Amino acid sequence: GLSVALLGWVLWSRGDLGPGPDRTDPRPVTPAAGYSSEEARTIAVFEEAAASVVNVSQVYESFDPAARTADGFAVDAGTGFVWDEAGHIVTNFHVIQVPGSDIERERRIRIAERIRVALDEEFVYDAEVVGVSPDHDLAVLRIDASPHRLHPLDVGTSADLVVGQTVLAIGNPFGLQRTLTKGVISALNRSMRSPSKRRIEDVIQTDAAINPGNSGGPLLDSSGRLVGVNTMIYSSTGASAGIGFAVPVDAVNAVVPELIANGHVSRAGLGVILDESSSRLRFGVEGVHLEEIAPGSAAERAGLLGVRLIDARTRTHVRGDIILAIDGTRVRSNPDLYDVLQRLEIGQTVPVTVDRLGEIVEVEVTLQAVG
């Protein structure tokens, strides 16, 4: 005990048991151990691909009556990426769609009158809309930028993706340019509804954080190749919830060239306007209610009937045909019809079963191209 007490007194007297001296100089920096191989690859992919990712915004005019001046203010809408050195930019259709507009209800496509693309803070361009495909939630814009400022992404394939594979999402959430998130492919062969209520097949599900501002941005594999276009999240709050979806690149690679060439994507259709009422049991019949038949359309040539005026004096109308089945597949709603038509080819002749004022009629329709 005396030995321990003596040792303690010696240490205390030397200051070894008391507080150290105050330090007024910065702490020395401990050298880093270096990046792991995975970190190094992620950094390299981001640095290589970041210059290809752009900000897409809608521009609206504000008028100051006192100063009698009009200015444009931009609303950050989403992300896009450089497709080629001709200045084509790929993004989601809903990024350039007028907020709150509904294609089915309004029966027309409404996109912002002015769209702006920013390569970075210095180089900002007004964009021309080249083509849109609401069915795939894709749009192609074009900017008049010098080719040396445009850095197209390398394109991969979605055919050989596997669950668990590393993916990276680069986007513009909340107006913050070029934000990187990383995750894995959570599932494949998902499906989702597009802005036009058509079904998009083979959708990629990922747990890489995708926020609303990431819409239209690229989903990359670990080699930096484009494998999908980030389009939506599944969340009750609108915040990233670990369930994000991307349109597969194989669909993008098929649709984008057609949008550049024609401005739209042709698909098989009837040439009709459907009743978009939320009730599927109007008139006590569950099916697809035809409202109008386009003149010269496949439906008109087959003898399908829309809503008709039978007494001009009393403005009495009679309902149109109600499609019950097409090509042998029962359809109970408009999305059901869209799903069947998506599997059929332009020029293909198929049987269509309708309820015509209580009588079951079957007609043959040769499907036409619709945009």
Image (cartoon, helix red, strand yellow):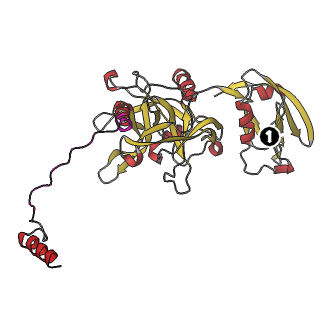
* x then y, percent, for residue 285: 85, 47
Mark 1 residue type:
Val
Residue found at the far left of this picture:
13
Viewer-closest of 214 and 27: 27
Viewer-closest of 300 and 218: 218
User: Crowdedness of circle 1 by 10 Å Cα count: few (<14), some, many (20+)?
Assistant: many
* x then y, percent, for residue 60: 41, 44
- In the rendered image, the quadrant that contains the N terminus is bottom left
Q: Where is residue 125, by image quadrant?
A: top left
**1 with respect to 325 (left or right):** left
* x then y, percent, for residue 344: 74, 27
Asked whether residue 38 is drawn in magenta, I would say yes
* x then y, percent, for residue 213: 44, 45
Say how many tags the image has: 1
* Highlighted magenta segment, given as a residue range: 22-40
Q: Is the magenta stretch mostly helix, strand or loop?
A: loop
Relative to 243, say whether 297 is above or below: above
Relative to 302, say whether 201 is above or below: below
What residue is drawn where x is 63% and y is 42%? 193
What residue is drawn where x is 51% and y is 53%? 238
Disc 1 marks which residue? Answer: 331
Q: Where is residue 5, by image quadrant?
A: bottom left
Residue found at the far bottom of this picture:
2
Q: Where is residue 52, by image quadrant?
A: top left
Asked whether residue 31 is drawn in magenta, I would say yes
- In the rendered image, the quadrant that contains the C terminus is top right
Residue found at the far right of this picture:
359
**238 with respect to 358 (left or right):** left
Q: Under tag 1, what secondary structure?
A: loop
Viewer-closest of 13 and 111: 13
Relative to 175, say whether 134 is above or below: above
